[in-house]
Amino acid sequence: MARSCVFLVPGDWNSRTGGYLYDRRIVAELRARGWQADVRSPGEGYPFPDAADLARAAQVVEALPDGACVVADGLGFGVLPDLAERHARRLCWVALVHHPLALETGLTPAQQRRFADSERRALACARGVVVTSPSTARVLAADGVPPARIAVVEPGTEAASWAAGGGAGAGALSLLCVATLTPRKGHAVLVEALAGLRDRPWVLHCAGSRSRDAAEAARVDALAARLGVGERIRWHGEIEGPQLEALYAQADLFVLPSLHEGYGMALAEALARGLPVVSTTAGAIVDTVPPSAGVLVPPNDVHALREALRRAMDEPGRLAALAAGARQAAGRLPRWADAGARFEQALLRTLDADAP
């Protein structure tokens, strides 16, 4: 008899963000391993669902058969504690937490408290919890989730060609940032840091949606114009496939000044291409980028980020050493088949576990 599970994932299943990519790849790997893995959506507006979203979530969950294994993406599960509690005995909840909701940047203190309390209640109903990094596992364990109930399944990567670099021309540095334009990704910090390096030759390429937070996009554009670096930033929007590969190929340095990351899949993709990294010590980044492959600075520290970028621009030998470290790190990255196997084992252990 085929093993089966249902993935409960809000929003656009085809969205080009790390979390959705992870979900899609894990579903594909489980299906390749013989699982019947169906996908259901509880609505669009998460993590701020309206009444229609909540009604849809209730309808979708109530239609699931008794005993179903439900892998609930944390973006929705963390704000559905009532639904989780109502079906805790009937269903086998498996929470998939990319990063705790309360750690999102830009929330008010009241929103942070509400998310923390809501997610804590929902996770108490989960028979198993899958996280994408040891860092997130530590956060949840400190918040009361039994460690024995947590499984770490890091994202996989695909084999890729080494980046050739040189996209900005001789003597200039081509920087690449792959991230949705939201406050948590730190684009504004990056613009401020680069503004202090206007006397050096560089170009910044940014790939990622500019429409998910229009206010933040407008703020960053205005900041770049005011600081005189707007013409040196290329915004490519939400791209994938050959277009994104071309950006990786021409880059000399990958930069991601996030204020928090539950894993940071774009960082792993950069390492897979042998790109040196400048990023931050936030969340799981320290578990992803080894010191031999990148320079990590405190999050939201403009001066430290500027100094790291300055050294990358002024010390080509140092940059070359980091690139060599990135190529070594690439060989240690897990593949998606590895991630699928570990996720399968996490599900099997959960199905054998007692309900909370």
Image (cartoon, helix red, strand yellow):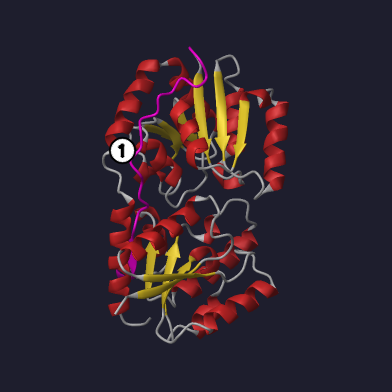
Identify whether 143 is placed above or below 82. above
Q: Which residues are magenta?
A: 148-170
Classify residue 350 as left or right of residue 73: left
Count the labels in the image.
1
Tell me: residue 48, above or below residue 87. above
The type of residue carrying mark 1 is Ala
Please identify the quarter of the rendering in which residue 140 is found.
bottom left
Residue at (68, 74) in percent of width and height = 52
Give the side of residue 24 with respect to residue 202, left or right: left
Q: List x then y, in percent, for residue 184.
A: 56, 47
Q: What is the quadrant of residue 343 in the picture?
A: bottom left
Q: Residue at x 61, y 46 (%)?
A: 182
Mark 1 crowdedness (10 Å alpha carbons): few <14, some 14-19, many ≥20: many
Q: Quadrant of the N terminus?
A: bottom left
Q: Which of 124/178 is in front?
A: 178
Along the horizontal axis of the image, is 132 left or right of 33?
right
Look at 29% across and 69% down and name the residue there.
148
Q: Position of residue 77 (x, y in %)?
A: 52, 70
The answer to whether residue 320 is seen in the rendering is yes
- In this rendering, the answer to whether 139 lies above or below 90 is above
Image spot of residue 65 (x, y percent): 45, 85
Q: Which residue carries the number 1 mark?
A: 330
